[in-house]
Image (cartoon, grey):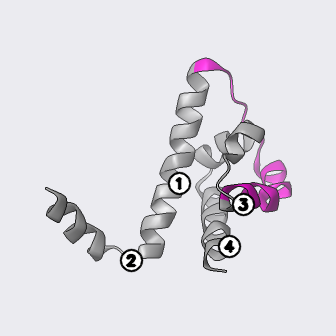
């Protein structure tokens, strides 16, 4: 079974796999967090206002959703903003 996973992962470019994982993680953060608390989607404007901080926290290995749960909820709901986050995080990781 491990060989099947490795074979499939080679079919998808590494950057795309990372982007998909980040978007999936944002969705799960929202779902799991919403079970214990109400997460309000902050909207595109507020999410973009703190995006650079959110990316810095994630790139440093911290969980930015703990500090900005509303932004995590927004990324789970807004594909365009989640893609912006994923792209910036990939750029930060490649530095």
- The CA span between labels 2 and 1 is 16 Å
Q: Mark 4 points at which residue?
A: 92
Residue 92, image quadrant: bottom right
Residue 68, image quadrant: top right
* Residue 67, above or below 38: below
Q: Earlier in the sequence, mark 2 or mark 1?
A: 2
Residue 13 badge:
2
Callout 4: SS: helix
The location of residue 52, given as percent across then percent down, is 80, 62
Residue 23 badge:
1
Callout 1: SS: helix
The location of residue 23, given as percent across then percent down, is 53, 54
Q: Mark 3 points at which residue?
A: 55
- The CA span between labels 4 and 2 is 18 Å
* Residue 56, above or below 62: below
Q: Earlier in the sequence, mark 3 or mark 1?
A: 1
Residue at figure coordinates x 59%, y 36% from the top left? 30
Q: Which of marks 4 and 2 is in front?
A: 4
Please check the rendered image and state whether residue 85 is part of the magenta-colored stretch, yes or no. Answer: no
């Amino acid at each position: 079974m491990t060989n099947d996973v490795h074979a499939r992962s080679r079919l998808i470019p590494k950057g795309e796999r990372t982007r998909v994982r980040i978007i999936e993680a944002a969705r799960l953060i929202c779902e799991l967090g919403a079970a214990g608390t109400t997460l309000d989607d902050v909207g595109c404007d507020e999410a973009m206002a703190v995006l650079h901080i959110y990316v810095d926290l994630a790139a440093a290995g911290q969980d930015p959703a703990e500090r900005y749960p509303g932004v995590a909820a927004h990324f789970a709901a807004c594909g365009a903003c989640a893609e912006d986050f994923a792209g910036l995080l990939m750029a930060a990781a490649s530095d």
